[in-house]
Image: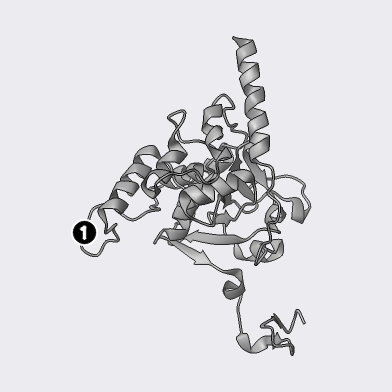
Amino acid sequence: MQQTETVLDRVGRFLAGRLEAESSGYQPYTPSDPQTLHRTLRPGDVLLVEGNQHISAAIKYLTQSTWSHAALYIGDTLEGNYADDDRPRLVEVNLGDGCTAVPLRKYRTYNTRICRPVGLTPADCQVVVQFMVDRLGLKYDMKNIFDMLRYFFPTPPVPVRWRRRMLAFGSGDPTRAICSSLIAQAFQQVRYPILPEVTLAPGRTSAQSSYSRREILHIRHHSLFTPRDFDLSPYFQVVKPTLDLGFDYKRLVWSEAGHGEASTEDEA
């Protein structure tokens, strides 16, 4: 029995390595600056990432979104002697590594988006952050190799209504390859909503179409969320660092070539 587990683990690690290999030709349009992110992010914020791994292409297709990865910002919660650039301030789940803490500089060459839970109390924020911190070291079960095989087909001929369900198909449990499922569970600890309510009620945000209601019920039942859900959530605010830190278009210095390029006076 031990030999069988060892073989499956080896096969799983091999598949995970192939899926996490980077795709060629990825060029971020607005790459993230770690210092700017550090000044903007608050504990409890969700950082969405446009990944460039092979698994990212499949997740983008299945979720119909540009965001393929999500991480939770925990600030300076983790103690230790770190250089500022090396301090792990994000908790995320990766297919090969499981639940880990990483520094902001990891995503300096990626397009990112900050999603902030509006009105989250400091006490509940601490619960959400601690939930993720307590799960550091949680490993992906490499024996669930069938959960990984689907990601080798980044654009399978799957109808739209079945694509999200394909993310859950396999072992029967929400795959840990979808990082946002663990983050969603963290917010569920304090009953903070992510998607609209299913039922119609006066003055309450709700799903209008029967298809949307079925999808939301499916997601809640399986505790399976995707990075896109934080972007579309009416309860999470999209925060753009260039605007949050103060923006004055009068300070832009436009190039004389007239190609639409501009920089601030501080950058010029």
Residue ID at (20%, 63%): 202
Residue ID at (70%, 59%): 109
Instruction: Name the foreground residue: 161 vs 122.
Output: 161
Q: Quadrant of residue 45?
A: bottom right
Could you tell me residue 221's position as x and y percent?
A: 34, 39
Mark 1 belongs to which amino acid? Ala
Secondary structure, mark 1, is: loop
Q: Does residue 177 appear to the left or right of 254 in the view shown? A: left
Image height check: is 105 above or below 145? below
Image height check: is 3 above or below 224? above
Could you tell me residue 73's position as x and y percent?
A: 59, 53
Instruction: Name the foreground residue: 114 vs 149.
Output: 149
Image height check: is 151 above or below 248? above
Q: Quadrant of residue 266?
A: bottom right
Instruction: Name the foreground residue: 80 vs 255.
Output: 255
Q: Does residue 189 appear to the left or right of 148 in the view shown? A: left
Residue farthest along the top direction in this orientation: 1
Could you tell me residue 50's position as x and y percent?
A: 60, 55
Q: Categorize mark 1 by other alpha carbons within 10 Å: few (<14), some (14-19), many (20+).
A: few
On the rendered image, what quadrant is the C terminus found in?
Answer: bottom right
Q: Which residue is mark 1?
A: 201
Asked whether residue 126 is in view, the answer is no
